[in-house]
Amino acid sequence: MDVTTPSKTIDVHLLSLLACPRDRAELYLDGQQLCCPHGHKYPIVDGVPVLLLAEIEQTIGIAKASLNAAETGIGHPLYVDSLGLSDEQRRGVERDWTAGAEIDAAVSYLVGATSGWGYVDLVGRLKTYPIPDIPVEKGNGDLLLDVGSNWGRWSVSAARKGWRVIGIDPSLGALLAAQRAFSGKGLDMGFICGDARFLPLKNDLFLRAFSYSVFQHFSETDAKMAIAELGRVLRKGGRAKIQMANKGGLRSTYTRTRRDYMNSGLFRVRYWSLTSLRETFEQNIGPTAVTAEAFGGLGLLAEDLRLVSAKARLLIRISTLLKSLSSYVRSFVRYADSVYVVSTKR
């Protein structure tokens, strides 16, 4: 069931989960925007509520572009300025959109920044949506939060396993691309344009939370804020599974000790020690374990073998072997470049 305004629609189930990111008050629909009892107002763009905070320093520049797009409507329906693409890639999106490409034009270019650049050779040439197998059990209609959902690959995977998925991301354009690409597929998904540090959601909602290649880009302060927010929105016994970059990984050590590492921008990967990860997640969520996700890089997923380059296939095979070994030799996880941090809310 939907609540409809002249130009915007928001799913009532999604609306029932939302809270003001400033004061956590309940939100209600007022014409073409969401409001809270304290006077805070938020726009809705094609069914996606935009709940970013303009007064807060953003973790990534596309958040500002999303705010501007929501306020002005300039760039509808693609909002290419909020996609985080180069000028050439934006032109490619607009060209393919006009040509009516079978694969959503925005996803076809966003895929280049997906999975640790493993799909870079597919940019603008995507023939199918690369949907991985999300490493969570089957759902039973329970809620799963996908933090940093972008164009929706992990959200789709979770929904296919029976979860009711809420995806949140600061890129309005990417979220709208997810809606276009996967609407009408019978998947229970809703999307929010928002900030992981100020989740616009009520307390104690989710049985599972998942995030891939997101928190590892945050500063330590921002990451701790976002992890605390996960603890707030998970219900008792709920579990978060968050991918992070391991400081002690073999490739991680090489990358973070290069001279140009500190000059690689605000959104560079931050590397945590396994001890710091356990302590931070336990403090903010609950009992925590760390498992290997990949060796030799990020996003080395076995299901991608048919899509990536020969070099990437070799790395995937090596990573898969080492990951298998780490399940028998627990100390081996210290050499993984990418890990999953799994925490259960007390």
Image (cartoon, rainbow, N blue to C red):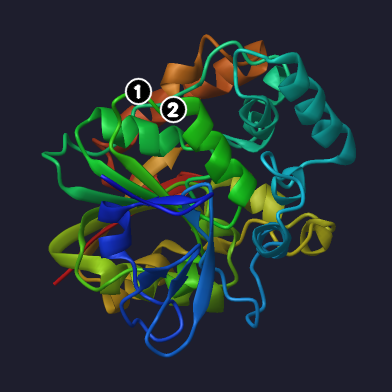
Q: Residue at x 56, y 15 (%)?
A: 313
Q: Residue at x 70, y 44 (%)?
A: 76
Of the pair 317 and 80, the residue shown nearer to us: 80
Of the pair 190 and 242, the residue shown nearer to us: 190
Image disc number at residue 185: 1
Q: Dots 2 and 1: beta carbons under 8 Å?
A: yes
> Viewed as shown, does residue 209 lie left or right of 119?
left
Of the pair 332 and 1, the residue shown nearer to us: 1
Q: Position of residue 134 (x, y in %)?
A: 33, 34
**Picture quadrant of residue 99:** top right
Residue 162 can be seen, yes or no: yes
Secondary element under disc 1, as helix, strand or loop, is loop
Residue 299 can be seen, yes or no: no
Q: Is residue 103 above or below residue 329?
A: above
**Picture quadrant of residue 274:** bottom left
- Residue type beneath disc 1: Lys
Image disc number at residue 75: none
Looking at the rendered structure, the number of numbered marks drawn on it comes to 2
Of the pair 153 and 315, the residue shown nearer to us: 153
Q: Residue at x 78, y 64 (%)?
A: 262
> Viewed as shown, does residue 221 lie left or right of 339?
right
Which residue lies under the disc numbered 2? 182
Secondary element under disc 2, as helix, strand or loop, is helix
Q: Residue at x 50, y 13 (%)?
A: 305
Q: Gap in Å between the C-alphas at discs 2 and 1?
A: 6 Å
- In the rendered view of the protein, which quadrant contains the N terminus? top left
Q: Is residue 102 above or below residue 208?
A: above
Q: Is residue 214 above or below residue 91?
A: below
Q: Position of residue 253 (x, y in %)?
A: 63, 52
- In the rendered view of the protein, which quadrant contains the C terminus? bottom left
Q: Position of residue 163 (x, y in %)?
A: 22, 40
- Residue type beneath disc 2: Phe
